[in-house]
Image (cartoon, rainbow, N blue to C red):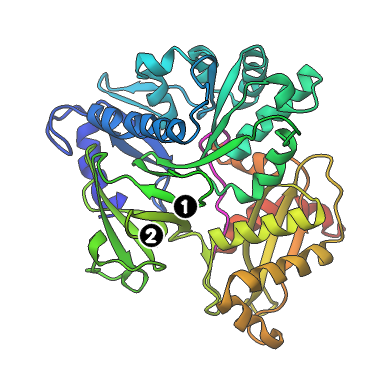
Amino acid sequence: MTYDELKPWIHRAMEGERDVVWPGQTKWFAQSSGTTSDQFKWLPVSRVGLLHGHYKGGKDLLAQYCSQVRDAQLYQGKHFILGGSSSLVSEGGVAVKGDLSAIIVRNLPPWVEARRTPKRSIALMPNWEEKVDAVARATMKEDVRILAGVPSWLSIVSERILEISGKEHLRDVWPNLWLYMHGGVGFEPYRATFDRLIPDVQGARSMHYLETYNASEGFFAYQDTLGRNDMALLMDHGIYYEFMPLEEVGKPAPETLEFREIEEGATYALVISTNSGLWRYALGDLVTVTSKVPLRIKVAGRITSFLNLVGEELMVKQADDAIASVAKQLGTPVYNYMAGPQIDALGKPIGHRWAVELKPGSMRPPSEAWARRLDDALQAANGDYRAKRTGDLALVPPEVVWVEPGTFDAWLQSRGRLGGQHKVPRLTQDPVNLNALLAPRDRELSPTC
């Protein structure tokens, strides 16, 4: 089922009807990115889904971490949780709508609420720009041991904390920092940024990073072992998984596989049935199976977020890794990026065009040199891309366009999606998003009469 097929049932539940998508009355509905027909999706969240999905997943992650780091002192201090930027709103006296993070914060178990920072009134501030400053000022005074949040937004808050405090590194602000639980977007493009924010210091313990796969639809996976770069799929948290082979995507009656039937190394579209009332729901995410026993995955990207102009089948994970590699080689930390088709005068897609925003204050090398490194990294990561680039016959070299700091945030704000849980689509087949992002720059460069 797609969201549009499930939407009439969800709307009945939002109007207060009982026993529609899940037994009893469903009260909470989490906002997620919209489909082609809606600005936002509203996804049901049941109490059992919170308790045995989101909260259980978080508790299990911390238990796994503490079993591997026996001297971890996480609960003597605070846990900095950076969520979305919308507070909850009531609709029709029944439905309560908002970011998943707002639903989670409003209903946190006592063992989490006692250690969370910032306080609820700041965490649920609707204005993201005001919230960044308030969060920075409130949390810099605390003894923070754990960080949790989307890397792009947490890096902004961290920079503001250093600016206000006058400190050089986050370790100077929070000397007892142990763990960063990240998710929402690929971490590799931000690794260099966090290496700078939280550097390894001789004689000090290492900072640990764990990836989570916690979406509005459910808590699916987390990195269960330090030193690995994949995640354990959670099989006992109220979610049933099916795996759709890529060749089945888009068919009227696609075949799906159970976990017993999948192949290690293969990539599948995820289909879920959840204890919040999503039934055989096409999530839209692509996952690559890295291990069957135990079942581990990597998020490869979105069904709608890829570049396949001539059969190159470039996925977000490959793009993330390539961007991170070039950023590290050239010392150019990336804040955000988006790639789409490069179109010739006849309207034919001939290559990839990348809009890249560096961290403020970063030196910009010539875009052509950066593009050459990016091309090399993409060819190393993707054999199909390498084949299509042979002799520039099917794909010309990629074009990299530098955009000014703040460009991506302004684009998100123009769409009403500025804040902690909203993410930039990395790869897009449709040039509309990329053109909209680059429109202010293109207007400045265009000749005037």
Q: Which residues are magenta?
A: 418-428
Q: Secondary structure at mark 1?
A: loop
- Residue at image coords 60%, 76%: 385
Q: Position of residue 290 (x, y in %)?
A: 42, 60
Residue corresponding to mark 1: 230
- Provide residue 245's location: percent of width, then percent of height: 33, 69
Look at 45% across and 55% down and name the residue there. Answer: 298
Describe residue 86's horizontal placement relative to residue 7 as left or right: right
Asked if the residue at tag 1 contacts the one at tag 2, i.e. Cβ–Cβ closer than 8 Å, the answer is yes
Pick the front one: 57 or 344: 57
User: In the rendered image, which quarter contains the N terminus?
Assistant: bottom left
* SS assignment for the magenta stretch, majority: loop
Q: Tell me the residue that label 2 is attached to.
A: 291
State whether residue 368 is above or below residue 76.
Answer: below
Closer to the N terminus: mark 2 or mark 1? 1
Q: Compared to 359, does 280 lie above or below?
A: below
Question: For the residues marked 2 and 1, what is the alpha-carbon distance in whole angstroms?
Answer: 9 Å
Which picture quadrant has residue 417?
top right
Q: Quadrant of residue 101?
A: top left
